[in-house]
Amino acid sequence: MYIWSINFNVMNKQNIQTYILLFSTVIISFFLSSCNKERVAHKIEGSWDKVWVEDLKTTSKERWIFKSDNTLIIMRNFYNATPMDYMDTIEVGRWKVDMKFDKNHRRLDIYDLKDGNVDYYNGEWDIINLKEDELFIVNKEVGRLFREFTRQKS
């Protein structure tokens, strides 16, 4: 009991203020990061069509639908390079936004995809560009696989 009283007495007013300031900064940073994460997630929600950078004239379509309940649906109008007249669901999984305190680093975590593209789509995707109608993401784990999207117009 005597040790605690000595430590408390050693702490002067300036040290207490420093600890309070440090604690407040951590709490505020956590709160702002959480709000920013929600803002980024809200910008991603919706339907995005892949831009076929390698062949802009293609009729192939790939659509990623980021739902507000964190469900991700991936659809295509082709199967094994065979065109179809309709969009078919090829994957259903989950997604979430993650951010790091030390940098302005935004990441999209995609997981629980099970239908044949597990290693291809699951993983951490860095958000390179996110605007109202543009999304560019890169998965470094799969040899810098990238996807560029435009928002699907309703």
Image: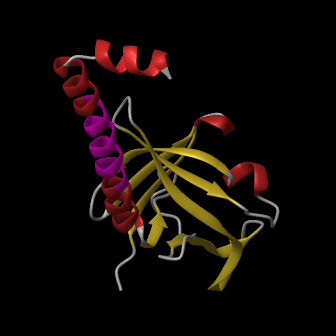
For the residue pair 52 and 22, the one nearer the viewer reads as: 22
Does residue 139 sit above or below 31 in this rendering? above
| Residue depicted at 27% across the width and 45% down the height | 28
- Could you say which is closer to the camera, residue 150 or residue 47? 47
Q: Main secondary structure of the magenta part?
A: helix
Whether residue 154 is visible to the viewer of this picture, yes or no, is yes
Above or below, 126 relative to 72? above
Left/right of residue 66 with respect to residue 131 in the rendered view: right
**Residue 101 lies in the magenta stretch:** no
Q: How many marks?
A: 0
Where in the figure is residue 121, as x and y percent of width and height? 67, 54
111 up-or-down from 138: above or below:
below
Q: Nearer the viewer, residue 95 or 14?
A: 14
Residue 24 covered by magenta stretch: yes
Seen at 47% across and 15% down, the residue is: 3
Please identify the quarter of the rendering in which residue 14 is found. Answer: top left
Residue 140 located left or right of residue 154: right
- Residue that protrudes farthest toward the front in the picture: 2
Q: In the figure, residue 13 lies in which quadrant?
A: top left
Could you say where residue 8 lies in the image, as x and y percent from the top left? 34, 21
Q: Is residue 116 left or right of residue 76?
A: right
When asked about the image quadrant of residue 154, the answer is bottom left
Q: Position of residue 92 (x, y in %)?
A: 69, 72
Magenta region: which residues?
A: 22-34
Residue 83 visible (yes or no): no
x, y percent for residue 2: 47, 17
